[in-house]
Image: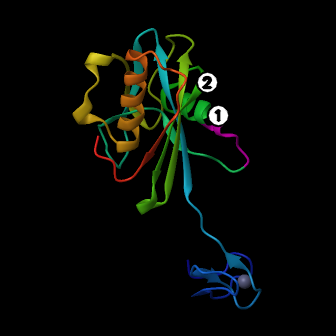
Amino acid sequence: MKYCSNCGKEIVKMIPEGDNIERYVCLHCNTIHYQNPKIIVGTIPIYEDKILLCKRAIEPQYGKWTIPAGFLELGERVEEGAIRETKEEANANVEIIKLQTVYSIPKISQVYLLFLAKLLDLDFSPGHETLATKLFSFEEIPWNEIAFTAVKFALKTYIDDKKNNRLEMTHVGFYPQHI
Ligand SMILES: [Zn+2]
């Protein structure tokens, strides 16, 4: 960040009075430009004993499999964002069941909120950012071709919960996590 989005003048990096973290500060209009983590929302769409995965048509991780997920928009509720991303990436209709995982990646300041969701029908197809959409049984999941650690974490916790009959749980993951 170089210029103030409020007045257009140059900004400086400094610790404001009463704070203990360096911020981008505009000394012309006294705006402090706080920066906070990005929130990513998505769903694990399930249909009977299968999970809907999307093959990525964009970088990063082009060609790898993931669940439908993306950045939460301003003014949007987390569940709405997760349903919207599922519609955009897989043209799939889902109903939220519960929050499956919360996963923080402090290194890149991202927080993932991934919901377990019921796939309402089999009328799904690849969206613009997706090469293919496919239902996988637990045994078929291509673990070595899953795009992101947070997604792997969500899928593994769901499968574990399902096998151990404890589907009411929400799991919190911390980076780095070797799974
Ligand atoms: Zn300014």
Q: CA distance from mark 2 to mark 1?
A: 7 Å
Q: Secondary structure at mark 1?
A: helix
The image quarter in which residue 164 lies: top left
Q: Is residue 179 left or right of residue 133?
A: left
Q: Nearer the viewer, residue 59 or 171?
A: 171
The image quarter in which residue 136 lies: top left
**Quarter placement of the N terminus:** bottom right
Residue type (three-letter) at the residue carrying disc 2: Ile
Instruction: Residue at 30%, 37% (x, y): give it.
Output: 64
Residue 39 at what x, y percent from top left? 56, 50
Number of residue marks: 2
Depicted 30 relative to depicted 64: above or below: below
Quick check: marks 2 and 1 in contact, CB under 8 Å? yes
Instruction: Residue at 59%, 26% (x, y): give it.
Output: 98
Figure quarter occupied by ligand 1: bottom right
The image quarter in which residue 58 lies: top left
Residue type (three-letter) at the residue carrying disc 1: Glu
Instruction: Residue at 22%, 35% (x, y): give it.
Output: 144
Whether the magenta-drawn stretch holds residue 78 is answered as yes
Of the residues under marks 2 and 1, which one precedes in the sequence?
A: 1
Instruction: Specify the label residue 96 is tagged with.
Output: 2
Which residues make up the magenta segment?
Answer: 75-81
Depicted 134 relative to depicted 169: above or below: above
Instruction: Specify the label residue 32 is tagged with.
Output: none
| Residue assigned mark 1 | 79
Depicted 132 relative to depicted 148: above or below: above
Q: Secondary structure at mark 2?
A: strand
